[in-house]
Amino acid sequence: MVSPEYNHAMSPALANLLNHFGSSLFAYKPSAIVTYSAGQWGGLRAAVGMRTFLSELGCLPVSAMIHVPKAQDEFLENGNVLDNAKQDAWQNYFARTFRQLVWWAEAAKQQRVALDPHALVEDFKRDPSQRNAP
Ligand SMILES: Cc1cc2nc3c(=O)[nH]c(=O)nc-3n(C[C@H](O)[C@H](O)[C@H](O)COP(=O)(O)O)c2cc1C
């Protein structure tokens, strides 16, 4: 999930898209959070909110996140780095997150085949009150 930081939150366009399709499409699949901003924190505050949001969708974020501060000084529009001396450092930084994501994605894929989570968990069909405590 790639997002800029707007008012310490994820992009409203991304939130709208996730809300539109809802959890059924995203549940039981892992995600990785990638944020960027013009300022020095790289969208970290948006990322904290994204963890909660994605967890509610059942699209659990892996622990390693990617944050790109001052994105306009680091990457060109085509995705290439501006400073070639930092190419390896960026690649290693991204790779840690993506390796976690691939590990969890492969594990989840195998388990979804072995046991259909929607059949096991009995997703609510009417409204969220169906999962209330007694
Ligand atoms: C309405 C608005 C709110 C923003 N809020 C933040 C913010 O809270 N923190 C931050 O670091 N940058 C903030 N920015 C700067 C954006 O992160 C920066 O402009 C980024 O490049 C936007 O991504 P985009 O060009 O892909 O839309 C904000 C920009 C806008 C237009």
Image (spheres, grey):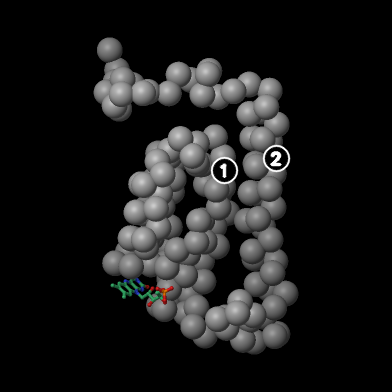
Q: CA distance from mark 1 to mark 2?
A: 10 Å
Tell me, for residue 85, which label it has, or none. none
Locate ligand 1 by image quadrant. Answer: bottom left
Task: Please identify the quadrant where the C terminus is shown.
Answer: top left
Q: Can you tell which quarter of the image residue 81 is in?
A: bottom right
Residue at 36% of width from left, 46% of height from top? Answer: 19
Residue 127 in the image: state x and y as whole percent: 29, 26
How many residues crowd mark 2 within 10 Å: few (<14), some (14–19), many (20+)? few
Q: Is residue 22 left or right of residue 7?
A: right
Q: Which residue is mark 2?
A: 106
- The answer to which of marks 1 and 2 sits earlier in the sequence is 1
Along the horizontal axis of the image, is 59 left or right of 22?
right
Q: Is residue 33 above or below residue 70?
A: above
Residue identifier under label 1: 30
Task: Give the residue at x 52% y 85%.
Answer: 73
Assess whether mark 2 and mark 1 are in contact (beta carbons under 8 angstroms).
no
